[in-house]
Amino acid sequence: MYDAIVIGAGPAGLQAALTLGRMHRPTLLLDSGEYRNGTVLHMHNVIANDGTPPAEFRATARAQLAEYSDVDVRDVGAQTVTGSEGSFVVRLADGETVETRHVVLATGVADDLPDIPGLQDLWGTKAFSCPFCDGHEHAGRSIGILGPAPRAEHLIGLLGRIVGDTTVFPVEQPFAADETRTLEGLGVRVSAEPVAAVAPEAADVRITTASTAHTVAGVFVASGSLRHRAPFADQLGLELLPSGSIEIDDFGRTSQPGVFAAGDLAHRASLPGPMASVLLASAAGQMAAVGVIQSLMAH
């Protein structure tokens, strides 16, 4: 019987396991090998790790966790979580079941990208969503933004003082006339035709429409959506926020006693959505672990 099973070994899960290990709480960390930034070459906006490859970051964390005898790490995912506070059963992908008093969900989210040929192949290397993570690397360079218009406006506001020439491309349908005027008023070019495909072109990206082609240094995607990478919120009947994320309090507690959540799949109701950041995910993992320890002490 573990005190906690942490499901997911990105920044949130790794930090949760470290905090629990330092408090000598028997903990199992499950690593499915799937990560939202799995295709990313270098992570940014992480103090002391700016430019570090995510795989190197995870490897360093795993090596440090190996120093804590109370933390077991297994390279296997989880399939189901059942039970209640003090007695949860986690069924692993290899068929084994393990028991725990508390569960920390840190499985993160996956990006559902618009159905644009070539976009998935560029994701994380030449196509991005986060100006804080990848804007600086395009300083003074030309970029393309893939609509829709309202979300493209937000990206323009963040990237405008950083990047060079910017062209906004609609997805599926052309922009309405008023949307085009609004975007052009922000000092960017607007394609009259939707993006048809993207592809690498030497060190750049080639964006094609039905009749034109544009070469840019990188692409920022303003469309698409997020989904939970795992089904545990539904399995456990957890309360969700309008964003689709798991609702948590300041210590990562969910609506189900004994279940905590941290990282991109959860946020407090005071925030409009999850704050996708390695540092914030790590901080959330630490807070969830503190919440687990508070619960253990209370019982």
Image (cartoon, grey):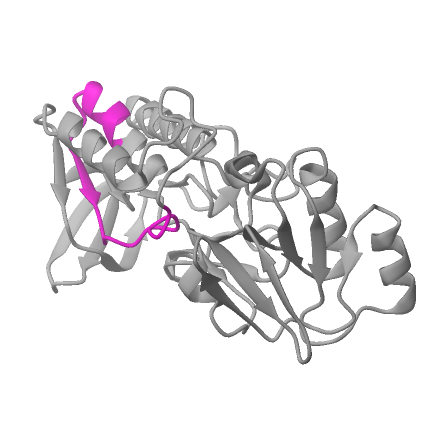
In the rendered structure, the answer to whether residue 22 lies left or right of residue 119 reads left
x, y percent for residue 133: 51, 37
Query: Would residue 248 appear left or right of 32 to someone viewing this image?
Result: right
Q: Is residue 137 above or below residue 286?
A: below
When the figure is inspected, residue 287 is found, relative to residue 159, above or below; the finding is above
Taking the spot 64% from the left edge, 55% from the top edge, the residue there is 144
Instruction: Evaluate whether residue 54 shows in this view.
Output: yes
Residue 27 colored in magenta in the image: yes
Q: How many marks?
A: 0
Q: Nearer the viewer, residue 296 or 115?
A: 115
Query: Is residue 130 depicted above or below 92 in this figure?
Result: above
Residue 242 in view in this figure: no
Residue nearest the viewer, comparing 270 with 126? 126
Q: Residue at x 31, y 38 (%)?
A: 53
Q: Position of residue 252 (x, y in %)?
A: 45, 34
Residue at 18% over, 62% down: 93
- Choose top left, top right, bottom left or bottom right for residue 96: bottom left
Q: Pinpoint residue 80: horizontal percent, then vertical percent.
A: 27, 61
**What segment carries the magenta color?**
17-40
